[in-house]
Image (tube, rainbow, N blue to C red):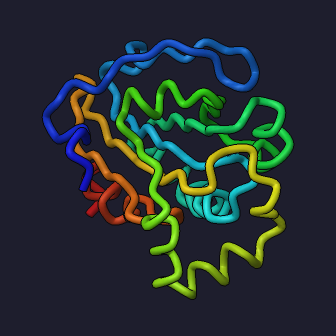
Amino acid sequence: MISMELNKGLQAPLFVTKDVFGNTVDLNTYRGQKVMVSFYRFASCPFCNLRIQRILGNYSKFEEQGLRMISFWQSPANSILEHVGQQHLPFPMIPDPEKNFYRLYHVENSWIGALKVMREPGLVMKALKGRFNPLEADGDMNQLPADFLLNPDLTIHTAYYGEHIGDHIEFAEIERFLGIL
């Protein structure tokens, strides 16, 4: 794994930025709540959009348990709205084409990691069956995803760095964090 990764128990790096609608997103205002901060690839990424569909299918359960979510995308706002935004996410979508927040959270690129997705042909087939075209990339093709579960004091409970381009934290881990399992 990457030596610069954030780890459990560390204070999550704070940020203040704007989402795709121009609303201010200040991590400090989430203090007192459980939060999941997720870093996705680009807005037309089939793996990311498959993940978003799965998140939306579980969102009400997560929200009932008090989980708040924030998503970062390496695409510009107009692309996020055109692609992933059509799914009407109930949480902030933050454009970060300069990848400032990716660097802040030590989210990396890896061609080896990008290719590791081929070890999961079922995931590849599900992702490519969607309506999203991976060739419309407006970000790095080798960007790896990452998810961070934050405690109410905004310390890191779980830092999950994806091993490949479709690898996110398991829902069971989120449910354990929320006390569902």
Q: Image height check: is 163 above or below 138?
A: below
**Outermost residue toward the front?**
111
User: Residue 111 in the image: x percent, y percent?
Assistant: 49, 62
| Front one among 151 and 93 | 93
153 relative to 59 in the view: left or right? left
Q: Residue at x 72, y 47 (%)?
A: 43
Q: Residue at x 58, y 61 (%)?
A: 51
Q: Quadrant of residue 96?
A: top right
User: Residue 121 in the image: x percent, y percent?
Assistant: 56, 87
Q: Residue at x 38, y 59 (%)?
A: 169
Q: Residue at x 46, y 84 (%)?
A: 119
User: Residue 146 in the image: x percent, y percent?
Assistant: 42, 49
Q: Which quadrant of the rendered structure holds the N terminus?
A: bottom left
Count numbered badges in the picture. Answer: 0
Q: Which quadrant of the rendered structure holds the C terminus?
A: bottom left
84 relative to 125 in the view: left or right? right
Q: Image height check: is 55 above or below 10?
A: below
User: Residue 176 in the image: x percent, y percent?
Assistant: 26, 57
Q: Quadrant of residue 141?
A: bottom right
| Front one among 31 and 18 | 18
71 relative to 84 in the view: left or right? left
